[in-house]
Amino acid sequence: MAEDKMQTDEAPAPAKDATKPEEKPKTVGESLKAVIAVLESATKLKDTRVLSGRVMRLTAAFRKQLTGEALKAFITGSLSADLESKPFLLGHVDKASAGEDVPMQAEDSPAQPAYTESSTPEVELFAFMLVATYLVDKKAYQQLTDVTTRATERLSTFNRRTLDVIAARIYSYHSWGYESQGKLQDIRSTLLALHRTASLRHDSFGQETLLNLLLRNYLHYGLYDQAEKFRSKAVKEEGVWRSHQQYVRYLYYVGRMRAIQLEYSEARDCLQQASRKAPTSALGFRVAADKWLILVRLLLGEVPERVEFAAPGLARALRPYFELTSAVRSGDLVAFGQVEARHSAVFAGDATRNLVTRLHHNVLRTGLRRLSTAYSRISLADVAAKLHLPSAEDAECIVAKAIRDGGIDAVIDREAGAMVSREQQDVYSSAEPAEAFHARVAFCLDLHNEAVKAMRFEPDAHKGRALESAEARAERLAAEAELAQAMEEEGDDY
């Protein structure tokens, strides 16, 4: 009996997951079929939240695996034969996929799924969007403009809110195609007409996207005054943005405009929000925002910490701006000139050369502040020598301006030709600590107000909540969780 018991105890327990088959990853065709099912369901329910969240998220998931063969199978099976866009799209996919490596099909590999033909505008325009995405990845920009132009013409014949999200993405690709070919000015009148139409139709997604596309168009050519005039007339009311991505882009463009207009405090606030609200995966956008933010902070007299230049994925791109910050912090005019000359091409490509030129005065002011702290009395000739200025007269003018602006606490002894520094006061006896505390409290209050404004509620959510059944509550919580996940994963196209 003891032996039987020992054998029983030592017998291995059956594995629970031994018989469970491993789930195979979905093919592109299966993913496309699932997206179409969600798209048609959301269209019937007129649920724009699902279209802007789940449909776009599922599409981004298989974007890298999208091939010409899978795209042609989808267009052939999903679009109705009487649609003129069907042969048009197939022709562009054939042309773009020419020479594409077709993987060998294994014997047990699943075939393309059987699609159901549909003549709904949402499926047709979704096919246009997929082809445009494929052409962007292939860098076939001339074909991209042809496809998006045809899609824009097709969209003008509909006024359906279920098409707004797809239309906004097509407009983005339309502008991208022209920008990649260096013809961005050719599309400006078209974008203005589309924005006017979107405003008349109360197309929120289209308004937000087209507003940012037009701001980008103006800023690309340095038309800051025109951009501000358009923004002041076309801007949406604060707190009603439907797309988090577009709102972050809008903050970035407004920050750039404010920086050029010398409104540095507002520019810093906008650029800080844009950098913080951008998803961590949007490295390109964060780099662009941080470059402008660094220069604006330097112009305000602030010096960014070294750790801000060492963020993962940003250190290499921000290297020229780190060297520039080091030169400004040291107040060395020669080092500043060397950095400016060495990285002039980078600053020109980033459209920040104007701000870099303005930093020349900040370098002088920093150098003067260091001298006024180190010396209680120093001749203007020595000031000119240490700051590499042409003469003592130039040094006197710069010192006088710094005293008038409050940059240094000193006086000029004209008879002796010297700068006399006053005794440093205790900073805690001044209003500076109170001002710093006030700025932090104001930031926390603004953050709270923005969080409240960003909350989304269903229409008439306050009605009937007390009589909500358990099943309805479970569905509502699931929808809210899905929306939260969608917002968290936004930013694939930054």
Image (spheres, rainbow, N blue to C red):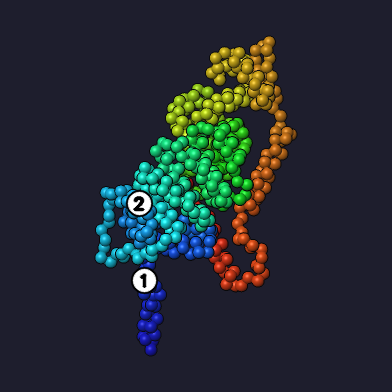
Gap in Å between the C-alphas at discs 2 and 1?
A: 42 Å
Taking the image as drawn, is residue 377 in sight?
Answer: no
* Kind of residue sitting beneath label 1: Pro
Badge 2 is on which residue?
88
Which residue occupies 48% across, 52% down? Answer: 157
In the picture, the disc for residue 438 is none
Which residue occupies 56% across, 34% down? Answer: 226
The answer to which image quadrant residue 69 occupies is bottom left
Residue lying at the far right of the rendered structure: 429
Q: Which of marks 2 and 1 is in front?
A: 2
Whichever of labels 2 and 1 marks the residue nearer the N terminus, that label is 1
Q: In this view, does 386 lie to the left or right of 452?
A: left
Q: Which quadrant would the N terminus be assigned to in this image?
A: bottom left
Q: Is residue 171 left or right of residue 101?
A: right
Q: How many badges with numbers are in the image?
A: 2
Q: In this view, does 241 lie to the left or right of 54?
A: right
* Kind of residue sitting beneath label 2: Phe
Badge 1 is on which residue?
21
Which residue occupies 53% across, 23% down? Answer: 333
